[in-house]
Image: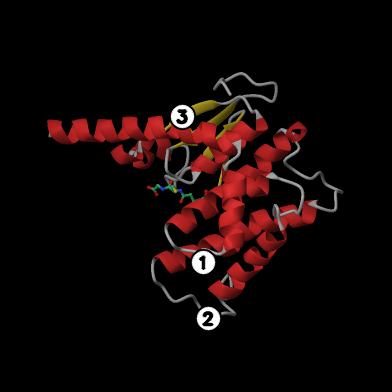
C-alpha cells in the first residue's frame, strides 16, 4: 500500500516507530488498504519525547493518528476508528450485527484487562487486590482469552476482524517475551494471524526502518 496524503476518506496520518505498539496500527492500515501518510519517529534518538511530537501527543507515545486534523491516540480507540472508517474491508461488524458487541468487548478487554495485567507481570508487581485490579487476577484474565482462542479460529469464531490484528500482533510479542503461557491455542492463533500477507509486508518494511534507526544511533555514538 503506497503511503499517500490523499485518501477518499480525508487526510490520514500515522505516527509510527518500528518495534512498538504502532506496528499493529500500521498492519491494520495495510489490511484495510487505507492510504495514509507515515510519520516515523526514531525512538532510539528519543524523537517521541521531543517538542514536535509532544505537541501532537503530550504522552510521547505511539501509535497516534490524525484524521483531517483530529487526533486519535490509544491503540484500542485507533483500531475501532480505522476499521469503522474503512468498513468495505469487512474487518468490523456493523452496529446491529450480533458480533458487534463481542468485537468491541475483545478490543476493550485488550486495553483495560490484558495490558495492565502484562505490565504488572513484566514489572514483577503484585496486582492490586482482585476487587480493585482492573483485571482481577492474571490467570482468570488470561483463561478467558485462551478459551476464546481454543474455540477459534479467530476471536469472533469464523470471522477475522480488526480485533485479531490487535491481539495477534500483541500476543506474538507477549509469547516471545514469555509474558503469557505458551499454550498451543495461543501459538496456533499467533501463527494463523501473523502469517497473513499484510503482517509479512509490514514486518519487512519495519525491519528496514529499525535497521536505519540502529545505524543512525551507531553513527551518533561514533561521532560523540
Ligand atoms: N496507552 C497507549 C500506550 C502506547 C505505548 O505505550 N507506546 C509505547 C511504544 S510500545 C511508546 O510510545 N513508548 C515511548 C515512550 O514512552 O517514550 C496505547 O494504548 O496506545
Which of the 4 image quarters holds residue 84? Answer: top right
| Total numbered labels | 3
Q: In which quarter of the view is residue 61 placed? A: top left
- Residue on which the image places disc 3: 39
Q: Residue at x 41, y 34 (%)?
A: 207
In space, the residues marked 1 and 2 are separated at their CA atoms by 22 Å
Q: Nearer the viewer, mark 1 or mark 2?
A: 1
Which residue corresponds to the image point at 33% horizontal and 33% vertical from the top-left? 211
Give the quadrant of the C terminus.
top left
Disc 3: residue Cβ within 8 A of ligand 1's nearest atom? no
Residue 77 seen in this snapshot? no
Taking 65 as reference, is 163 above or below it?
Answer: below
Q: CA distance from mark 3 to mark 1?
A: 35 Å
How far apart, in angstroms, are the residues tagged by discs 3 and 2? 41 Å
Q: Is mark 1 within 8 Å of ligand 1?
A: no
Q: Nearer the viewer, mark 3 or mark 1?
A: 1
Q: Which residue is mark 1?
A: 181
What residue is drawn where x is 57% and y is 49%?
Answer: 191
Q: Position of residue 131 (x, y in %)?
A: 59, 80
Q: Horizontally, is 220 left or right of 175 in the view?
A: left
Left or right: 17, with 94 as reference point = left
Check if mark 1's residue and mark 2's residue have beta carbons within 8 Å: no
- The residue to which callout 2 is attached is 129
Q: Residues within 10 Å of mark 3 (few under 14, many from 20)?
A: few
Amino acid at each position: 500500500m503506497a503511503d499517500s496524503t490523499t485518501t477518499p476518506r480525508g487526510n490520514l496520518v500515522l505516527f509510527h516507530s518500528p518495534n512498538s505498539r504502532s506496528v499493529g496500527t500500521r498492519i491494520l492500515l495495510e489490511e484495510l488498504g487505507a492510504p495514509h501518510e507515515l510519520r516515523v519517529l526514531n525512538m532510539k534518538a528519543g524523537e517521541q519525547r521531543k517538542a514536535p511530537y509532544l505537541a501532537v501527543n503530550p504522552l510521547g507515545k505511539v501509535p497516534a493518528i490524525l484524521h483531517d486534523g483530529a487526533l486519535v491516540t490509544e491503540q484500542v480507540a485507533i483500531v475501532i476508528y480505522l476499521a469503522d472508517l474503512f468498513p468495505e474491508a469487512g474487518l468490523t461488524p456493523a452496529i446491529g450485527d450480533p458480533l458487534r458487541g463481542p468485537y468491541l468487548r475483545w478490543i476493550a478487554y485488550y486495553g483495560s484487562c490484558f495490558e495492565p495485567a502484562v505490565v504488572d507481570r513484566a514489572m514483577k508487581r503484585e496486582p492490586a487486590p482482585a476487587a480493585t485490579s482492573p483485571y482481577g487476577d492474571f490467570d482468570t484474565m488470561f483463561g478467558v482469552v485462551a478459551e476464546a482462542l481454543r474455540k477459534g479460529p479467530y476471536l469472533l469464531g469464523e470471522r477475522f476482524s480488526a480485533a485479531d490484528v490487535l491481539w495477534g500482533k500483541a500476543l506474538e510479542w507477549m509469547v516471545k517475551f514469555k509474558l503469557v503461557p505458551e499454550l498451543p491455542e495461543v501459538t496456533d492463533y499467533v501463527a494463523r494471524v501473523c502469517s497473513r500477507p499484510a503482517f509479512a509486508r509490514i514486518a519487512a518494511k519495519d525491519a528496514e526502518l529499525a535497521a536505519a534507526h540502529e545505524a543512525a544511533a551507531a553513527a551518533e555514538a561514533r561521532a560523540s
